[in-house]
Image: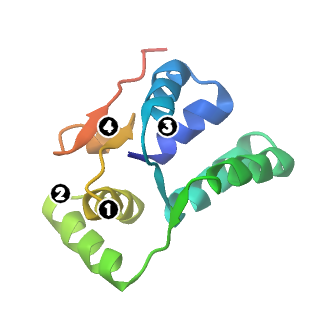
Amino acid sequence: MVLDTSGWIEIFTQGPLVSEFRERTDAAERIVVPTIVLYEVYKVIRRQRSEQAAVVAVARLKAYEMVPFDEDLALEAADLSLQHGLAMADAVVYATARHYEATLVTSDKDFAELPGVVYLEKPEQ
């Protein structure tokens, strides 16, 4: 399984979908984390909470299998970006999930209709 940044943010900030994302991470046999997700989680948590909270979040992410952004993923992400109109970070996350034949779990609407994605819609606020 690949959990998108939106899912990790839900978990680390106790968002409205925290239970749904935790259930999926608890049930997953394997979780891979693209390094771009590490970047995004650190940035968001540091901006919203604190540097200390961001460092704790990073440490928790590093307990899973980290996937570096290499040449193969770069080219696959570029193709997927062109094919599906994805922004760079989203394309890297999606390419990682596809490369590892993993399900992508997210609450990011940009992924909602893509194959191999479980989209968890956020409740209206």
Circle 3 — which element?
helix
Disc 3: which residue: 7
**Where residue 39 sits in the image (x, y, percent)?**
60, 61
Residue contact at pointers 1 and 2, CB within 8 angstroms: yes
Using the numbered discs, state the Cα–Cα distance from disc 1 to disc 3 in whole angstroms: 16 Å
Circle 1 — which element?
helix
In the picture as drawn, the residue positioned furthest to the front comes out as 29
Disc 1: which residue: 91
Q: Is residue 108 left or right of residue 53?
A: left
Using the numbered discs, state the Cα–Cα distance from disc 4 to disc 3 in whole angstroms: 12 Å
Disc 4: which residue: 109
Looking at the image, is 7 positioned above or below residue 91?
A: above
Q: Front-most of 69 and 84?
A: 69
Q: Quadrant of residue 122?
A: top left
Circle 2 — which element?
helix
Q: Tag 2 or tag 1, which sits nearer the N-term?
A: 2
Sort mark 3 into few (<14), some (14-19) or many (20+) by Cα contacts within 10 Å.
many
Q: Tag 3 or tag 4, which sits nearer the N-term?
A: 3
Using the numbered discs, state the Cα–Cα distance from disc 3 to disc 2 in whole angstroms: 21 Å
What number of labels is visible? 4
Disc 2: which residue: 84
Give the residue type at disc 4.
Lys
Q: Front-most of 55 and 85?
A: 55
**Residue at x 30% of width, y 50% of height:** 102
Q: Tag 4 or tag 1, which sits nearer the N-term?
A: 1
**Where residue 71 sits in the image (x, y, percent)?**
36, 85
Q: Tag 2 or tag 3, which sits nearer the N-term?
A: 3
Looking at the image, is 91 positioned above or below residue 110?
A: below
Give the residue type at disc 3.
Gly
**Residue at x 21% of width, y 58% of height:** 85
Q: Is residue 74 left or right of residue 15?
A: left
